[in-house]
Image: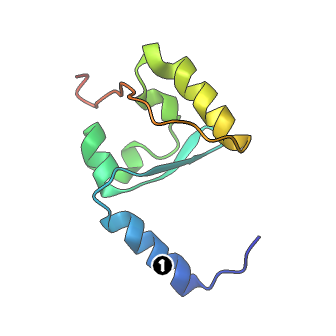
Amino acid sequence: MVDTPSSDLGSFRKLLDESTDAIAVHRDDKIIYANPAALKLFGYERLDQVLGRSPFDFVSPHYRDIVARRIFKEYAGSATAEIEERMLHASGR
């Protein structure tokens, strides 16, 4: 593990928090971070509404196999091309 000063981690967190791009981080099939843009995109108001949930909870059932294969490839170090995926909103739309 890289020894990173806490000020660097704070700066990185600030960068993620202020990004207009939706960013969510998951580990072991659990969301461990989502920035305000991700919360807004998926229709949630608070981080605790998504923390600990599977990222697949936010993916349309028709796309879950595709997304799972893409995640597996990324973990294996293979690049994946960008694709359009259908996601799920808190409102059900």
Which is more toward the observer, 83 or 1?
83
Image location (x, y in percent) of residue 33: 48, 54
Image location (x, y in percent) of residue 2: 73, 75
Which is more toward the observer, 35 or 79?
79
Q: Residue at x 27, y 58 (%)?
A: 20
Against 92, residue 9 (above or below) is below
Q: How many marks?
A: 1
**Residue furthest top as drawn:** 62
Task: From the viewer's perspective, tell me whether residue 85 is left or right of residue 32.
Answer: left
Q: Residues within 10 Å of mark 1 (few under 14, many from 20)?
A: few
Quarter location, residue 87: top left
Against 71, residue 24 (above or below) is below
Please say whether residue 84 is visible from this viewpoint.
yes
Q: Residue at x 31, y 67 (%)?
A: 18
Q: Quadrant of the image for the N terminus?
A: bottom right
Image location (x, y in percent) of residue 88: 33, 27
Task: From the viewer's perspective, tell me whether residue 57 is left or right of residue 76.
Answer: left
Against 61, residue 18 (above or below) is below
Task: From the viewer's perspective, tell me whether residue 47 is left or right of residue 66.
Answer: left
Figure colour scheme: rainbow
Quarter location, residue 4: bottom right
Q: Residue at x 38, y 28 (%)?
A: 84
For badge 1, the amino acid type reads Gly
Please say whether residue 44 is visible from this viewpoint.
no
Against 52, residue 67 (above or below) is above
Q: Quadrant of the image for the C terminus?
A: top left
Quarter location, residue 59: top left
User: Which residue bears the numbered disc 1?
Assistant: 10
Q: Residue at x 29, y 53 (%)?
A: 37
**Residue furthest right as drawn:** 1
SS at mark 1 in the image = helix
